[in-house]
Every structure is written in C-alpha cells, then in structure tokens.
Amino acid sequence: MTDGQTASSDGRRPTNLSTDEMVDAYGDALFRYAFARVRDQHAAEDLVQETFVAVIESQPSFRGDSSELTWLIGILRHKLLDHLRKRGREQPATETDDAVVSGFFDDRGRWRTRPGTWRIETETLLEREEFWQVLERCITALPDRQAQAFCLKMLDGANSQEVCKTLGVKATNLCVLLHRARTRLRDCLEKRWFGQTSSGEAGR
Amino acid sequence: MNSCEKTTRLISEGMDHHLPWFKRMAVRMHLLMCRYCAAYYRQLTGIRALLAKARQAGRQIPAEAGPDLSDAARRRIKEALRRRP
C-alpha cells in the first residue's frame, strides 16, 4: 500500500486509489486540458502536479469515478488561469499576420476558398463521438495564441474582458485572434467532417 | 459594400461584443448579397451554439486529442506526491 491510501485505512472506501493510481487515472486527461490552454509542455506538467498536490492536501481519498475528473479540472483551471495571467503580464503579446487566414481571400478581400453550404445539427452532433475527435484535432491544429483565446472564450465560456486580462491582450487583439481561430476552425471542420460527403451527410 | 474578408471580421467581432448599428447594417446587407458569407455566418453561430451545449452537458475538451503526460513527467509527479508528508 502506498502513502496515498492512508486515508482509506478507516475502511470507508475500500476502492480508494493510491496516489500512483490517481496519476495514472487522471494524469493524461488533466495534462491534455492544460496543454491545450497553455501550449507549453513543462508548464502543463507543473500545473498537473500542483493540482494533484492540492487534491491530496484537501481530500486524500479517491475512487476513480467520472465526477472526480470534473472536480479535478475545476482545481486545475484555477491554477491554469493564474499561470496565464502571470505569463500575460510578463510577456505582452504581439500579433503578426496569419498567412493561412489571409490566404482564404484574394487581394480584393473576396473568398478564394468558398465556404460550403453545410449546417450544424446540434442535437445529432452532440452524440457523435467521431465529430468531437475531429473538432479536437482542429483546435489542436490552431496556432498557440489563437488556440488559447478560442479555448478560454468558446470552450470555457469566459467573457472577452476576462480573456483579455488572462492573456494580457487588448480587446482589438482578442478580436483578431478569435476571428482567425474561428475562420481556421470552420475551414478545418469543412475539410475533415462536413466536406467528407457531398450533402454534408456526415453532420446529419 | 464591405469585402467578404471585412465582413467575416465583423461577423466574428459581433459574436464577442455588440456592434454599432451601421456595422450591423453593413453585415446584413452583405449577407443578403453573398451566400458564402451567409454560410460562414450560419456555420460560426452554429459552432458557437454547439460548443455552448457541449459545455452545459459537461463535455471536457479536449478529451482525446493532444499528447499524453510523458513517462518522465508521470514518474516525477508520482515521486513528488510520495515525498509529501
């Protein structure tokens, strides 16, 4: 038995995870969540470690069920936002041109790669795990700053002011980042999901 | 009339904060004339609604895409947790 199981010695939770098992059960999910938002391997690893330390100090017994991941992510999220705010203050960002997004348009600003006619069928897509895998890959493929802005704003539901403060960017820069992220993501989803069948059947 | 590129910027901006009436009008006029930007608009608002639903449903993103915790980091973290009093 390892140290992490000392809390189960009272016998209330015979299925408690040891600290090693806890790292194995949740480490990857926490790391991916952090990495998608900080885009820095070492920082993401440190955040995962800090999260586990905080958890052990507050509630040493763990069973390995799904609500625990949600709870862990809540803790990770606080640490992650602190980290981003600190970094935003230390390294103010500058945005350069995004050749991919400007490449979607010609020199007069008309579409070069015209959007298809697909629609999002919310209820159906919510249940399609393959779709979410594609969406995650499209988000992963975004440039770092765009991905950070997109995750905080569109996945986590933070408001623009919070995101600006967290990332240390001005409101106008955030608009630029989000426009680029959304435009790239739209294009990626079209290529990898909605454009796979002629009628957009994949999305239905 | 605004270009498609400018219109997509305004569409995206309009999702983040309220646009003044003349910009909203310019977008609306453009969308009446341009089915590509109209598709872009529908798709972006569709994606936003979908992600909001997923968040309400408690979906963690990313769940699968992206790297695993490296073996070295995993060992280091386990070691650090064992050393705790």
Image (cartoon, coloured by chain):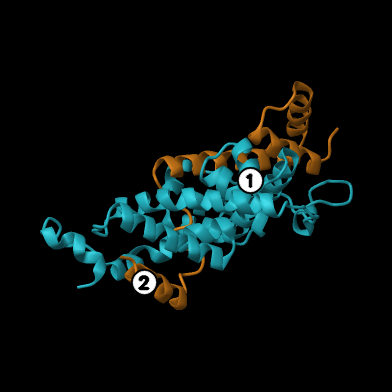
Residue depicted at 65% across the width and 42% down the height = A164
Q: Provide residue A71's location: percent of width, then percent of height.
A: 35, 49
Residue depicted at 72% across the width and 51% down the height = A92
- Which quadrant of the structure image shows residue B84? bottom left
Between the C-alphas of marks 1 and 2, the distance is 50 Å
Disc 2 marks a residue whose amino acid type is Lys
- Specify the chain shown as cyan: A
Hue used for the chain lettered B: orange
Residue depicted at 37% across the width and 74% down the height = B79
Q: Chain of mark 1?
A: A
Q: Residue furthest left?
A: A11
Disc 1 marks a residue whose amino acid type is Thr
A159, A106: nearer the viewer:
A159
- Quick one: quadrant of the N terminus of chain A? bottom left
User: How many numbered circles does the render carry?
Assistant: 2
Mark 2 element type: helix
Mark 1 element type: loop
Kindly identify which numbered label has been placed on residue B78. 2
Q: Provide residue A116's location: percent of width, then percent of height.
A: 66, 49
- Which quadrant of the structure image shows residue B3? top right
Kindly identify which numbered label has been placed on residue B18. none
Q: Provide residue A107's location: percent of width, then percent of height.
A: 89, 51
Q: Say if residue B81 shows up in the picture.
A: yes
Q: Which residue is mark 1?
A: A117
| Figure check: A30 above or below A75 | below
Q: Provide residue A91's location: percent of width, then percent of height.
A: 70, 55
